[in-house]
Image (cartoon, rainbow, N blue to C red):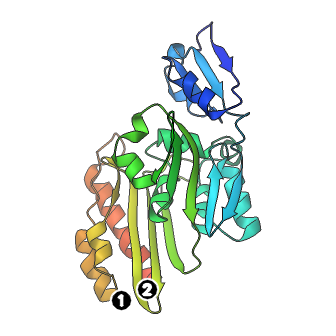
Amino acid sequence: MFNENLKWYFPASIPKAVQLIEQPGIILHGGGTRILKTQSRSIIGLVDICNLKLDYIKQKNNLYHVGAAVTFGKVVKFSKENNCLSMLGTALSEAASTPVRNRITIGGSIKDFPLWSNLIAPLIALDAKVEINNGSSKIIPIEEYITSGMIKTKHLVKEIIIPEDEKIIWRIKRFTLLKFEYPIFNIAIKFKFNGSLVHDAAFVITGVKNRFKRFNKAENIFMEKNLSEKLIKQAMKFIEPKFVSDYKYSSAYKEKVAKIIFEDLLLDIAGVKQ
């Protein structure tokens, strides 16, 4: 239940919005899906971002700029219509339900980073950056944004910046026993090739301890080599996701399933029949 004296604010500029959210009890409002999961009585003000002109997807110099007010549904539609951002579009098409995808905003999902989020794993794998404003504008890698603690500070997410590269091969997996449940974890895998050799790789999982894990040692196994089943077997020794047990599943069960899925996805990319 909301505070009976709740106030709405409709700033016309990012500096004004940032100034407002610096005050205790005043938070940003985009799609509104997060508010139901907060202590709403403690919220005394909502800063609506509808007048900040952040509902855009633009391409410039092989980069896609996706504004914070863009919904998951809009990204999915843009991806299909323009045959781009395929990894992100596919990941978000599997999130929640159609009505909810048309409410969840990019900015809110980045700032809150719920453990079941379909957004963060592909963004990290794609080497995305996030532009934020906390009185001044900063652009930082999404991985650094999370690990540095910046995500917990008061600021406004303006946009994400994603490089578009047709040379990548990717796989994603949202693991849940029932389709309509929150996923237990999300996996994103990306390879970039220079000829037949692996030039870049990213293996990411979310929903684990510390929110996400990137397996750098496993990635390095493939650098400047041909992708093969032998290398995959070597890399799997370094893919050790750590989970917390819950009322449904033990940590050991989740860890075993995640490892099996990682190996299956890697073998699929390599074209190994299973």
- What residue would you read off at disc 1? 228
Question: Residue 41 location, x and y as percent?
Answer: 53, 13
Q: Secondary structure at mark 2?
A: helix
Which quarter of the rendered picture does the C terminus lie within? bottom left
Residue type at numbered disc 2: Ala
CB of mark 1 within 8 Å of CB of mark 2?
yes
Quadrant position of residue 21? top right
Residue depicted at x 37% and y 44%: 248
Q: Residues within 10 Å of mark 1 (few under 14, many from 20)?
A: some
Above or below, comparing residue 117 to residue 154 in the picture: below
Residue depicted at x 71% and y 71%: 83
Residue type at numbered disc 1: Ser
Per the rendering, the mark at residue 270 is: 2
Q: Secondary structure at mark 1?
A: loop
Question: Residue 227 location, x and y as percent?
Answer: 38, 87
Above or below, comparing residue 126 to residue 7 in the picture: below
Question: Residue 97 location, x and y as percent?
Answer: 65, 47
